[in-house]
Structure formats: structure tokens, C-alpha cells
Amino acid sequence: MQIIRLYKTAATLLAFHDEQYYSIKADWNSFVNRKELFKNILSELPSQTRIDKATAETIIANELQAPIATQEVWAAGVTYFRSRTARMEESEVSGGATFYDKVYVAERPELFFKATPHRVSGHKEVVFIREDSSWDVPEPELTLFVSSHGTIEGYTVGNDMSSRSIEGENPLYLPQAKVYEKCAGLGPCLVVTDTPIPPDTLIKMSIFRKEDLKYTDSVPISQMKRGHQELVDFLFKGCAFPDGCYLMTGTCLVPDNNFTLQDDDRVEISIDHIGTLINEVQTLH
């Protein structure tokens, strides 16, 4: 499995491949939104400017941005059995629990709009919890970058912030539970590979409160009920994405029902082959 890591910074794009960094002067949208992206980048790297490791790491540390420009972020739900159970538990009071059981076994997946680019936080940036929500959790998700042709061209780490108390009150409140300022995290980079990401890839999430570990767990993506291309194909049935899009693929890591995020909590989400996305939590006032 060969990997190219693309980092979006304030001034340029950085590519890391085969222990070498390259500086690429290109528009993010046009650069990543291509079929067979790995082959295209690999063929172009010899003509790009090489930079030393120390310089590249300094740029990444000080100028790193979320790997997104004009793309929309969408998300899939109830793609793991554990997420089905959690969504049913949160909706027992409203009587909406059966909806999640039905969608888990249905042919059509749950797909919903998640964020515009300005509502996305990058690595080491703040994500928000809503002031009008009493139960809030991060949801760690393998996130696909999909070209305008509907082909999966890359992967990143996603944090799908969720106001479970709002969604649990009524399933029709899902947009308010999912879409608000700084409701999503993406990063630290976009990984482009010559083969699909392996099914034994582990997703791990840890939540810290004043350096005290409050939650940690991991799961392989092989536990997903839905295939990645299956989700993409359903999304593209009714939508066009001229610059491509991001699609979060669902979560299986759900903290206990008595846990809710608080100000200054730190969420660390790691996915094999990609890296670690770190976000601090604050309340949106």
C-alpha cells in the first residue's frame, strides 16, 4: 500500500511520499478533484519543489488548515450495529427508535448534509457543542474524499459532532443536532493511496478532561455494514459535486449514555495509515 499525504497550508500544498516532502503550488480543488488521483500526483512529484523535513514540519505546525476548500461535507448514519443501538437508545423517549432499526436493514442508507467548509475545523482547532443541548458527543469517522466523477480518491479523519439530546427528542431535529458552527473536524491531512484502505484499518478515539482519560476505544472499519462505494453511489444519485465532496462513513465508537462533552475537553481521533486529528471542545454561545 503506497501512500501520499497531502497537507493544506496557508501558502501552499505539501505532499509527503516515500520519506520526502514536496511543495506544490496549486489550487486545492483542481488538484485533488481528479480521477486516479494517486497516479496523477505520483507522476507529477518529480517536477515539484522538494523541501527538507524540518522546513515542512514547521510549515505544517504553524500553517496547517483543514483539507477542504469549497467541498460540501456529507455523512452516513447507522452504518455500524453499535451506532444503530445508540441512536435507538437516544430516541426511545420520542418513539423514534424504530426508524434507526429499519434503516440499518434497509437497502437505502441514511445520508445527510453535515457542513459547509466554513463550519469545518482542522487539526488542533476548536469544535463546538451547542448551548441548547445537554448531551453531546464526538463521532470518529473514516471520511472519504470523492471526486466529481463519484470515485473515491482519498481518505481523512473526521469528527462528526452530535447533539444527541436534540436528535433524541425528535428525529426531525437531526439537522439541528448535526449542522451548526464548527460542527465537524477534518484532518490532519488527505491520504491518497494506490489501493483502497484495508478493512483491518483501526479507528481509535480518546477523550481527555484536564489530562484525565475519560473514554477510549477502537474498532476496525471491517465492522461497517455498508460498503464505501455503496454509500457514494447513493449520495450521487441525486446530487452533483463540481469540486468533489467529503463523505463521513459513520461511527461505531459511542461513549456511555452518562457521558457528555464539556468545555476544554480534548478529542483525539486516530485512523491507521492517515494520522491523528485533535480538537478542543468549547460551547457555542
Image (cartoon, rainbow, N blue to C red):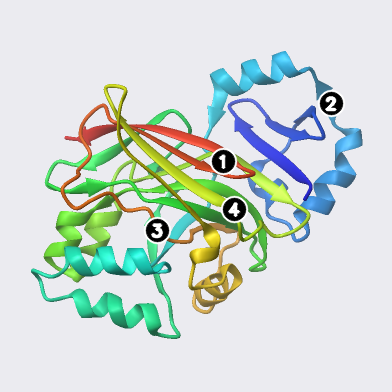
Mark 4 surroundings within 10 Å by alpha-carbon count, few (fewer than 14), some (14 through 19), many (20 or more): some
User: Could you tell me which secondary element the residue under label 1 belongs to?
Assistant: loop
Seen at 62% across and 61% down, the residue is 199
Sequence-earlier tag: 1 or 3: 1
Tell me the residue that label 4 is attached to. 201
Q: Image quadrant of residue 279? A: top left
Report, in whole angstroms, how far the alpha carbon at label 4 lies from the one at label 1: 21 Å
Tell me the residue that label 2 is attached to. 49
> Could you tell me which quadrant the C terminus lies in?
top left
Q: Contact (CB < 8 A) between labels 2 and 4?
A: no
Report, in whole angstroms, how far the alpha carbon at label 1 lies from the one at label 2: 20 Å
Q: Image quadrant of residue 153? A: bottom right
Front residue of 214/77: it is: 214
Report, in whole angstroms, how far the alpha carbon at label 1 lies from the one at label 3: 24 Å
Tell me the residue that label 3 is attached to. 252
User: Could you tell me which secondary element the residue under label 2 belongs to?
Assistant: strand
Query: Would residue 96 appear left or right of 116 to someone viewing this image?
Result: left
Residue 123 visible in the picture: yes
Q: Image quadrant of residue 95? A: bottom left
Residue 212, given in percent of the width and then of the height, sits at 29, 26
Q: Mark 2 or mark 4, which is nearer to you? A: 4
